[in-house]
Amino acid sequence: MNDYSFQLLAIILYMLTMIWIGWYAYKKTTNLTDYMLGGRGLGPAVTALSAGAADMSGWLLMGLPGAIYLSGMVEAWIAIGLTIGAYLNWMFVAPRLRVYTQVTKDSITIPSYLDNRLRDNTKLLRIASGIIILVFFTFYVSSGMVSGGKFFESSFGFDYHVGLIVVSLVVVGYTLFGGFLAVSYTDFLQGLIMVTALIAVPAFGIFLTGGIGETIESIKLVNPEHLSLLPATASAAAIISSVAWGLGYFGQPHIIVRFMAISSVKETKSARRIGIGWMIFSLLGAIVTALVGVAYFQQQGIALDDSETVFIVLGQIIFHPFIAGIILAAILAAVMSTISSQLIVTSSALIEDIYKELVKKDATDAHYVFSGRMAVLVVAIVAAVVAWNPNSSILDLVGFAWAGFGAAFGPVILLSLYWRKLTNYGALAGMVTGAVVAFVWGTVESLSSMLYEIVPGFVLALIVAIVVSLVTYKRNEEIEAEFTETERLLKENR
């Protein structure tokens, strides 16, 4: 067998494993709660790694290393901001959201939780949430498909569009049939593959470049400031924009839905430790991979055509073709874990929060599960059309969607968990403000180049939600009782 065949064999085995897990989960999915939330029975390790794998996407192994390869350690501020944001999310959102979603009529999606928590009789909040999820996740899913197309193009010389279609078919297959359980189980395995690859590539790569000292010297020859977190060219606004990525965690539906699915609130502490540990190793691995790449290609006098493929190219150079194939599977793991998570959340929003509310309220669970599967298919097709352009930047697409969710949902989720006086009108006004500001700011180059759109979106959404809530607040005994019951259960489980 030649190198190409070994690598392709590893990828095929990986994809067959994903499909088998999807089939296994399909056999365990019997109702709508199973399909959309896994029956609220996930253990801490599966919760933590599936949240991490769903979070990072192709950005972790392609976007972040590519950015650091080009611009240096100044791009690592994104990783620092994300780590802080993820820790705070696990600490302050995870346990409270797990309890509150069960207290509020056993809500199984973020829109249904907000609807039930705030007693929104107009249903506008639920519908607006579903629409925001649909719009921004279309861009997010597209970023994963772009990663998949680039992966097959750079690794095997496939046409970009062929790679996009292959990745889309496999991930849609196991998500469509296996639902949330398939997504969570595959994400757990994919998270293990990702962190293993991100430790192995830089660790062996340093030997290839002559050790730590030689690696550092080679990097300095490319750019003396490449290793500095605060190079002379860095502006305060650029660093704030990078760290502000951490704000996005509070409003990412595909991540915080994991908190709703964990088996008990007591498990959130173990899950937090596992999840943050996984994240630190993974991000450090991605950063060091990029730096080793800078050193190696400087020593070899080679110019890398596409900076976002530095992890792929190094993996192929360092390891035996079959092991390199497993390393390459880590790219697919990152890509597919995020696509599948986003597809299932989008499907949930479309069916549970829009279709079920506006079209067909009294159908059977079997009908809703079938509708959810069709929603997965439709969203995937639309996202593939958006991703058809091979020149789309992974980091730009992810950044745009991340900011949209963070600004729209983040302030509202935090206020709903910790402030009794949040009203449905305040939440709706804040959510729409965050989404519109992030969308408009992100599409105006003069604004987005000055400051990452999540900052103005998040701040304005928070202010608007508070002001409108204070104006429209009326005491509701049921809401007060649920808030008090949530606090009681949290104290009881500490």
Image (cartoon, rainbow, N blue to C red):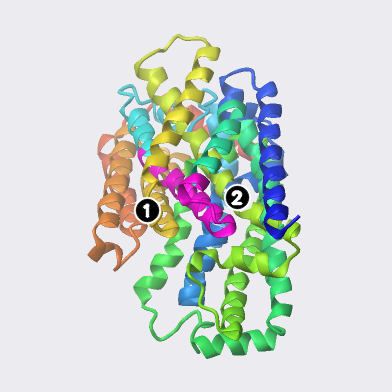
Say which residue appears at 63% left-offset and 69% top-offset: 314
Q: Mark 1: which secondary structure?
A: helix
Q: Amino acid at mark 1?
A: Phe
Specify whether residue 306 is in view. Answer: yes
Disc 1 target residue: 400
Specify whether residue 52 is in view. Answer: no
> What secondary structure is the magenta-colored segment mainly?
helix
Q: Position of residue 461 (x, y in %)?
A: 32, 48
Q: Position of residue 342 (x, y in %)?
A: 50, 40
Q: Quadrant of the N terminus?
A: bottom right
- Label 2: how many Cα within 10 Å (few below 14, some 14–19, many 20+): many
Left or right of 45, for residue 356: left
In this rendering, which labeled residue sits more in front, label 2 or label 1?
2
Q: Which mark is residue 332?
A: 2
- Label 1: how many Cα within 10 Å (few below 14, some 14–19, many 20+): many
- 253 is higher (above) or lower (below) than 124: below
Residue 251 colored in magenta in the image: no
First in sequence: mark 2 or mark 1? 2
Q: CA distance from mark 2 to mark 1?
A: 22 Å
Left or right of 338, for residue 1: right
